[in-house]
Image: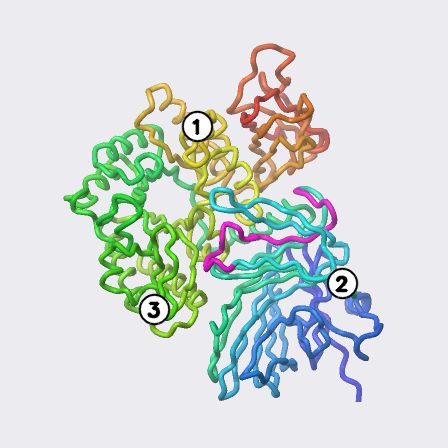
Amino acid sequence: MPLPEPIIRHLQAGGVSVVLGCPVDRLPEVLYWGAALGDLGPEDLAAVAALGEPLLENTTDLPVRLGVLPEHGAGWMGTPGLSGHRGGQDWSPLFTAVRHDVEGDRLLVHAEDPLTRLALDYTLELLPSGLLRARATITNRAPEDYELQDFVVVLPLAPEAHEILDLAGRWAKERVPQRHRVTVGTYRREVRRGRTGADSPTVLSAGVPGFGFRDGENWGVHVAWSGNHQSFVERMTSGRTVIGGGELLLPGEVVLAEGESYTSPWLYGAYGRGLDDQAARFHRWLRSRPQHPASDRPVTLNVWEAVYFDHRLEPLLELAERAARVGVERYVLDDGWFRGRRDDSAGLGDWFEDPEVWPEGLHPLVDRVRALGMQFGLWFEPEMVNPDSDLARNHPDWILQVNGRLPLEARRQQVLDLTVPEASAYLLDRISALVTDYGLEYLKWDHNRDLVDAGSAATGRPRVHDQTHAVYALLDELRRRHPGLEIESCSSGGARVDLGILERTDRVWASDCIDPLERQQILRWTAQLLPAELVGSHIGSAVSHTTGRASSLDFRAITAMFGHFGIEWDINGLDDGELAAVAGWVALHKRFRSLLRSGTTVRGDAALREVAVTGVVAADAAEALFSLSLLARPSTWPPGLVKLPGLDPDARYAITQVGGAQASGQPFTAPAWQGGSLVVGGRVLGSMGLQVPLLQPEQAVLVHLRALR
């Protein structure tokens, strides 16, 4: 007797459609993921399913269907969704769908394999922004242990996706774009650093050749996990192509006893016509979360590049006075405040105020900061420990290691094993006590080294998976105890930027490099995942701490404008005129920060690649703020026109320069708009463009557009 026809489901939200085939005897499959298909009736859905019917040619006698969890036993010759075994047995599961339900825009699947005695629960949901996310749980139903080796979530790609774009990078140069052709085989990015990594792909995308910020269909994935992870694109000889990812497990890291389960991280998928469209799906969803920062982000002063480890009360008080004078709203005391911490070689882990530097505790500084009307924040690096510390001497068994062999030191640090209950409890108690004692509003949570030989001192087993969950649990409990506390994720700068850590934190530090030329690229590509208000963005000193490059205040400030704005600079050395200039930029940011916090990020595909166009357009397109930056000397000159994307084509906009390089006074060197307010239609600005001034390299202008309706 033939089996019933599969049920075809259509999910649609935010300009995206997902069509699902749900057979009664097998796992569901994603038949289509892409641009919205509109309202489809039963006949239309059946036709959509028929369009994707695979043909048979020198393969299995039944068509190979790609279920939501790819299975080798079903004929899939690519990467299986699940790999594992019980002493070499039960290594090829083949699930029978017990039930699948669609609740609104969410697919819930429960399936069993009686032979391997495994159960699968799978969730796929299309969020209102059009962002798609999926994760799965595997449960061991047998008395024998099941060793999980690999568990990934995959989504289908359209056949026209012939080019890959992902990000790489290193310390102080994060999120460097790179492109590759999609070829037969697997393009796989693995991060084994025990944290997200400065070289993380962040969003791995595949699309039509040459897809850019404004044009070209593309499909991207992000693994929402702060430990080891993998992302990949895989094309079979049949032409079928998938994109996916998940946690990257170390040998023996997850062994399931009877009744135990493992749940994969969420894999987020974003379809777009152009990378801005893809990014907007991430941004809209992040902004819809109940924990997302709802207020304008306070202008922040971090003292690190002002004083480093030289903590003395008087200079720090003077910094507070000057910070308040220029309009700072949050003052953050960075590394160097705790016991024995005069450089990075000692003290890490001893989270007590250093009595030699702070005989009265931090109260004299905290009290003055508050009296000046600013919030107070404090730096921690809870997951690390210096061997030269009381904590390490008293609890060597709390350090991650393999069979009594300490890992190679990095930054003269080792890593605390937060899976040891006493270690996690110590950190929770010490941090919580300091938050309470000083009424801290903000923590800068740092993580300055990769995890090498991250094993348990007690068992020798690998601990990256458990360590990541333990960090999450510690952050969750801190937030539960202190509901108003905000936390920044910093990890050697931008090495922990992912949606797993951002479920528990309020912003990330994009990079330890705040040289504006480097930051132009870093911020541009961090925006592929995160909206401006979640990314710390500071004005540094005239000569960069990390590169030695000198740059103007205008260029530094305009670059910092498009993020959670702040200052990281010894402003004690500024004269009154220089302080007034800084205050002017702070005031300008405050004027536009509501727009930056709520508007849509747009990035121009300028014909002249040395010109960077970055903008934020209000949700109703009533106003917009753009920066036009010349990053290097181009081979052709003058720069010509650049398109301003995202505007209302039917509105007319008054264009006003609000900051940056000024016209020289010679009429032939200044565009008409730069000398005053020019009114131009949005369609003209989006299709023809705006004339770029004759800037010098590493100069920028900030342009405000106001719709006249």
Q: Report the residue marked by disc 3.
A: 404
Residue 465 or residue 671, whichever sits in front: 465
Residue found 60% across the figure and 33% down from its top: 612
Q: Residues within 10 Å of mark 1 (few under 14, many from 20)?
A: many
Q: Check disc 3 and give the amino acid type.
A: Gly
Pick out the residue farthest to the left: 359
Q: Which mark, by number, is residue 40?
A: 2
Is 591 above or below relative to 501?
Answer: above
Confirm or deny contact between disc 2 and disc 3 (CB under 8 A): no
Q: Residues within 10 Å of mark 2 (few under 14, many from 20)?
A: few
Can you say which quadrant of the picture contains the N terminus? bottom right
Confirm or deny contact between disc 1 and disc 2 (CB under 8 A): no
- Which mark sits nearer the N-terminus, 3 or 1? 3
Q: Dot 2: what SS?
A: loop
For discs 1 and 2, the disc positioned in front in the rendered view: 1
Q: At which x and y percent is residue 261?
A: 49, 77
- Which mark sits nearer the N-terminus, 1 or 2? 2
